[in-house]
Amino acid sequence: MDSEASTVTRTDAPRTTGSRTLAWSAGLSLALVVTVLGSATLGPVGIRYEVVARVILDALPSLSFTVPATARTIVMEIRLPRIALAAVVGFALGASGTVMQGFFRNPMADPSIIGVSTGAATGAVAWIVLPITVPFALGLQGAAFAGALVAAFGVYLIATESGKTPVATLLLAGVAIQTFLGAVISYLLVNAGESLKRVTFWLMGHLHNASWGDVVTTLPVALVVFAVLAAYARDLNVLLLGENEAHSLGIEVEHSKRILLALSSVLTAAAVAVSGVIGFVGLVVPHVMRLLVGPDHRILLPTSALAGGVFLVAADTLARSGPAELPVGIVTAAVGAPFFLYLLRRREVHAL
């Protein structure tokens, strides 16, 4: 009887996890759609929900609705590219933050912990301040993306010895590289001259120049990398037990670590390159979702990604709704920091 019960439990566990993942993902996807529609209605010219919905549906193949030309221009050419990019960047930062916290087994880890964000900032600031060019006319985004990847893989090479990459060494190397690149950014800021305002605005995180081109460039990278990361969710669960335990359970530890680190770095780099440095999304969102859905990365990873999209769309809507537009990084920090301190006071952030 016990054996039968045990068999039923083992068989039902993946089914239950799959059902919970599907239910939570469906709910958060609906929340994302509602947030996007609500965000598109807000601005200097108010547009009703049903008009926004008709404009979006009219843009889809094989569908046709009668919509005012002015509303179509405002929604499709001004607001929706920015909202869509906020959703994609939030999705990427939420997913990479979840992976980084699991990888480092550290609740304070976020996508910037191995210098990815600082590397992107260095590349972007250097491109703005110095007379440098990027191959293939990739411009500011290309410089930021390249800087992020150089920093991430530089940290990895520094921390790797004899084919092994201890997590503690990786963390310390990341802190050292961040500090060094911070000094480089400070030097460039001192010599920025008339470019200082542009540099400062980029460093605060922004989405005001978003275009459909940014969305088309970033979305495929985010979806493909996320799909591969999702395939490693079980490995991430086992790595939380410790590397020796993971190895004894059949996980190729170093191979999985290289894949997780490389993909989460690419995901972060793709997001930061088009939006600047936006803090707290990758740190706070995974914590909130962990409280709601638990620590299993098979459900935590997709829900954190979707919740990151919802959070950043809402934060950017707030950033552009005031008398003067703010960089979205200010809003995420202003909202995220007090909420994170609240979690700390409640001792909710002490384990993964």
Image (cartoon, rainbow, N blue to C red):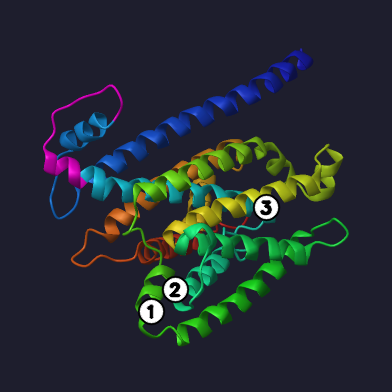
Q: Which residue is mark 2?
A: 128
Q: Is residue 33 visible?
A: yes
Name the secondary structure under disc 1: helix
Q: Are marks 1 and 2 in contact (CB under 8 Å)?
A: yes
User: Main SS of the magenta segment?
Assistant: loop
Q: Which residue is mark 3?
A: 261
User: Where residue 49 is drawn, which disc sits there?
Assistant: none
How far across and down, in percent of the image, does residue 19 sit?
53, 25
**Residue kind at label 3, given as amino acid type:** Leu
User: Where residue 195 is drawn, which disc sits there?
Assistant: 1
Q: Which numbered disc, 3 or 2, marks the residue that appears first in the sequence?
A: 2
Residue 44: image quadrant is bottom left
Residue 59: image quadrant is top left
In this view of the protein, which residue sits in the foreground, 149 or 333?
149
Q: Residue at x 61, y 55 (%)?
A: 265
Residue interval drawn in magenta = 60-74
In this view of the protein, which residue sits in the foreground, 298 or 114?
114
Q: Which numbered disc, 1 or 2, marks the residue that appears first in the sequence?
A: 2
Q: Which numbered disc, 3 or 1, marks the residue that appears first in the sequence?
A: 1
**How far apart, in angstroms, are the residues tagged by discs 1 and 2?**
7 Å
